Image: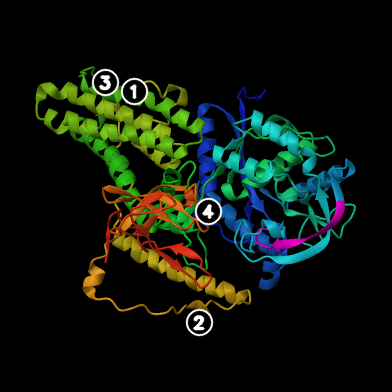
Amino acid sequence: MCTKCNKEKYYITTAIAYTSGKPHIGNTYEIVLADSIARFKRQEGYDVYFQTGTDEHGQKIQEKAEKTGISPQEYVDQVASQVKSIWDMMNSSYDSFVRTTDKDHEEQVAKIFQKLYEQGDIYKGAYEGMYCTPCESFWTESQLADGKCPDCGREVKPAKEEAYFFKMSKYADRLIEYINSHPEFIQPVSRKNEMMNNFLLPGLQDLCVSRTSFHWGIPVNFDPKHVVYVWLDALTNYITKIGYDADGASTELFCKNWPADLHLIGKDIIRFHTIYWPIFLMALNLPLPKQVFGHPWLLQGGEKMSKSKGNVIYADDMVKLFGVDATRYFVLHEMPFDNDGIITWELVVERLNSDLANILGNLVNRTISMCNKYFGGVVKKTGAQEAVDQELKSLAKATKDKVQKKMDELRVADAISEVFTLLRRSNKYIDETEPWVLAKEEDKKDRLSEVLYNLTESITIAASLLYSFLPKTAEKIVAQLNTSIRDFQKLDQFGLYESGTKVTEQPEILFARLDAKEIMKEVEIIRQAQKAEFEAEQRAMGEAPEEVSAENVIDIPAKEEISYDDFMKMQFQVGEIISCEAVAKSKKLLCSQVRIGSQVKQIVSGIRKYYTPEEMVGKKVMVLVNLKPAKLADVLSEGMLLCAEDENGTLALMTPEKQMPSGAEIC
């Protein structure tokens, strides 16, 4: 509780963005998600402190800077500025933007390292193992996946160097007990199970916390040839920037806000935030954060975004085509709680037309236009009620609690859906009451006025609940209704819109319908520009752009020719995977439920080595539909998923290049 403002505090952080390059829309999703939670908590009445920032040290940064011919500091200055400008563009309401090159942060990290060393938690040794530069992680041979980094799948190199290590095992049992006694600590639960079963229960190895093979980092005070290794540097930003002092002189801001109420991070760094970070805090005798939420990824058409693949979508490109709030809406609404979300340009257009233009924008425009047409813009409560009004009023009053419940569970997409349920019901109310018919009869004027009042009140409630997610749009709506964002505690009441208020004379079109073909023309221009930029970057880094060569193609033995009639016997369609699980009796098989048009087929595929069940859900895939059913490991399979295979036997699912409906014929 803040003694000055008499409000309960809420400290929320994002992961700090690594300054290796421009963040794509999947990275940007995190700041938008955090912002929506922070705004909602402020609406609820919390004293919110919202922190984000950039992670700027490490070998990867040093190497990139050297290749581009500038100093590491100049390099991170450029990228950090770019990150901050994108966060600002997305209307993020953060209170603090930390950079790990900030002098106050560097000073505290050095002091923390020395403190942990002096109390016996850090010791000097040597490390020999396989090193992944992009992840800045050491791995043993047994931890590698097919000889590559188990986190990113890239090549690793043998490395040996003197290093300092943190005694992770000293605190492991204490952390296991904490996680078991605090079920809310790691969310979603699937992430908790992964950390316990894959890392904690098998036993923790001591953690390398310094390096000597590069210099771009915070020097160890008592051994300056060492620099503090990435995670002890990066993770401590959550306390250093709010005023933690290792010597005991922490600021009032730190004492007020720590422990953090929520660390919001990507699922790929959950291990560092739920194992390393809590153990560091235990060693510092500090309380642990209340909750760590590892959100899923936003995938481009089912694949991770990569410049080399040419499938990256950036927030600034989306904003140019759709606007800030439309971009915020898509990433917030389309990301499931646990599974990865899918983004394609075509899907963005489809969703914005159906939800923002039709359901929201059209409702606001129609309501204001009818108020002006029939009553000169004056919205008046007359009391001429009918039974049909009660369902709308009841839903409007109940929506606040429904949204609040979803937000308490961090189910942001579901919270937005609750607001849109009210908007849909308001559109239905127009169809039910038929204001244009009421306007034809003089004795129905009071009834017509009441109908328009009910619509205006419902829109005001919906706009106030949308404020955390679409702040500018919500403000535009209430401005056109000549009111303001309503106090959150009053959003379960109906009838607070002041009777006799006059709405704007010319309603603004909030979201115009988009022409998909025209948008895709713009997208192609963006793609070509990105390709040229990527090739220029490669040349600047001394890496030639990839060209098609004998190493990039595969020849396979030809099969016997078939006739056209033979081909026509096979039925190929687009399917959507709606659920997937591993086959218990096999290490290779996944069993997917695939929606193909209006039917669902069960298909067993030998792709478990290349895809997890969670990755499969939501993918659009190519299916051989009329393959004779067969049993694989005692599980019935009713079709075949089409895959491509390289010379190493690696499989990749074949997916449509563009967004296609489930059931579309492949011909």
Q: Nearer the viewer, residue 545 or 569?
A: 569
Label 2 crowd bin: few (<14), some (14–19), many (20+), radius 10 Å: few
Q: In this view of the protein, can residue 510 be seen by the observer?
A: no
Q: Picture quarter containing residue 403?
A: top left
Q: Is 611 above or below relative to 491? A: below
Q: For mark 2, what is the residue?
A: 549
Viewer-nearest of labels 4 and 2? Answer: 4
Residue 444 visible somewhere in the drawing: yes
Q: Identify the mark nearer the N-term, 1 or 4.
A: 1
The magenta stretch spans which residues? 124-137
Asked whether disc 3 touches disc 2, contact meaning CB atoms under 8 Å apart, the reply is no
452 to the left or right of 237: left
Write down the residue under mark 3.
390
Tell me how far mark 3 sits from mark 4, CA to CA: 56 Å
- Left or right: 509 in relation to 95: left
Residue 501 vertical placement versus 606 (above, below): above
**Residue that label 4 marks:** 587
Badge number at residue 585? none
> Could you give the CA–CA distance between mark 4 and mark 2, rounded to whole angstroms?
35 Å
Secondary structure under the numbered disc 3 in the rendered image: helix
Q: Secondary structure at mark 4?
A: loop
Callout 4, which amino acid? Lys
The residue singled out by tag 1 in the image is 498
Measure the alpha-carbon separation of dots 3 and 2: 69 Å
State which tag comes first along the sequence, 1 or 3: 3
For mark 1, does the 10 Å Cα neighbourhood hold few (<14), some (14 to 19), or many (20 or more) residues?
some
> Residue 567: percent from the left, percent from the top?
26, 70
Asked if marks 1 and 2 touch (Cβ < 8 Å), the reply is no
Residue type highlighted by circle 1: Glu
Q: CB of mark 1 within 8 Å of CB of mark 3?
A: no
Q: Residue furthest bottom?
A: 550
Whole-percent x, y for residue 509 in the image:
30, 46
